[in-house]
Amino acid sequence: MHHRREHGLAEIIGFILILAGIAIAVGLYAIYGVPAQGREGEISHMNDVKDRFVEFKVNLDSLWSNRQCGTPFATSFTLGTGGAGTTGSFSIIPILEPVKTSAILDLGQRAEYITIAQDSYFMVTSGGYNETGTIGNVPATTITFNRTPMYFFINISTPDLLSPHGVHIYPSTGSAWDAWVNTTPVYSFYRNLTIVNGSYPYYGNITYAYYYTNVTPWNRTDITVSTMVGGIPVIQGFIADRNIAASTGYVVDLMKPSYGISSALGSTISPLNITANATDTTISATYITNYSYWPGQTSQTWNMGSLEYRGQNQYWVCQTYYYQMGGIFLEQNDGNAVKVPPAISFSMLNGTTPVVTIDEILLSGSGIIQGTGPVQVTSSIGSITDTQLAPGNNTQFVNLTVDTLSNNAAMAWNYTLLTAANQAGFPASIYTMNTGGAETYMNISPSSSIYGIQLALKKVVVNSALQTASPTGT
């Protein structure tokens, strides 16, 4: 009997050892295998979330760049891993499955703003913008063209119609062209025949004698235009107004193509200085420069809006992806990263002129959905507004200020603007930037006195809404 009892004890001990081995194996799998599977699933899922944001951006860019307002598109997001891709070989046992994670998808919940301040030439729909002045004799008058004018009027008058007077216009540097606007007297020429009867000592009696006298009386005075380009005459004495009256103003537009200097007056060099010199004090002369744009300083602040996915990961770092101003950002505890830069680009034209392009892609709409199911984001372009600026060099300065929710978000914006400036080859002398707390700013100003920036500014309003794709997504 004693022998049999020892035999049974050995079997029990062996069975217990087997159970212990299984428990140890299951425990090791639960400790190491399940987190590894969960981590892998969460990494894969967050990569899929990033792809969905890229898809959202590409579809949105395609619509607004083709100006397709009102055309809807939808992007689907799955909230959380749901355990779909993380089950192990023991998935029938709940404790051997990775914990299902959830997520939050919100629209318009980031109260972050962008402010754009500028000093630019804005297009005028009617009437134009005038700059006027008096043309002097000593000293002469300098006229500055910051952009190509629609009209360049020279207005002259004189009380003296019997003598020539006028205005000489030419570039302040160089001798590429010259123009003269003159009051030009016109005289008639004829000969008078005089017959004389009488007696002369040396010639004896003469029945009659005759002789001619040249006469050039004043006939009228005209306004004439003469131009030269590169030392070669284009027009000489072209009559702009015939038979003028004394002390009456007459206007000549030197931007007329027939005068041959409009292309020179429309030089893209900014600024273009022109000298206008009256021949004397007898003539009264003024100029009017009419532009199709007007200078103005503006500062506008916009809520950028956002589409944000906040993953509540259990095995990997918690990540937040969000779309804002055409860019895709990643937010983590250790900082923010720019995955796709926002729609602000810089370049240098001919290595001298900074070109700034800002597309304000503003998301409109709000909503929050939390859970583990699929969610659909439906969007369409509500409006596209182009700021009507003069072509070419149209801006003196551009100041960008971005107010964010955190220091990390501000640093991300600072990084993306600085990277764009460096890649464009912006000289350090034309811009300044810094970050203070949750705000970052960038000031671009090549010079305080000239309009030396080419700015393009567009505002795109995107209407978006959230909706669950299944009842489990709430």
Image (tube, grey):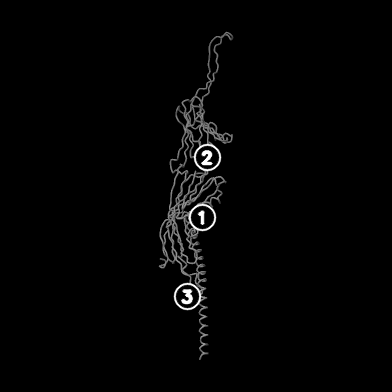
Q: Residues within 10 Å of mark 2 (few under 14, many from 20)?
A: some
Picture coordinates of residue 184, whole percent (x, y): 51, 28
Picture coordinates of residue 105, whole percent (x, y): 44, 62
Q: Residue at x 53, y 13 (%)?
A: 196
Q: Amino acid at mark 3?
A: Ile
Q: Amino acid at mark 1?
A: Pro
Q: In the depicted view, which residue is nearer to us: 218 or 304?
A: 304
Q: Amino acid at mark 2?
A: Pro
- Mark closer to the chain start, 2 or 3: 3
Q: In the depicted view, which residue is nearer to us: 72 or 354?
A: 354
Say which element carries label 2: loop
Q: Residues within 10 Å of mark 1 (few under 14, many from 20)?
A: many
Real-space Cα separation, disc 3 to disc 1, in angstroms? 45 Å
Disc 1: which residue: 341
Disc 2: which residue: 271
Disc 3: which residue: 93
Q: In the depicted view, which residue is nearer to us: 166 or 411?
A: 411
Q: Is residue 249 above or below residue 401?
A: above
Real-space Cα separation, disc 2 to disc 3, in angstroms? 78 Å
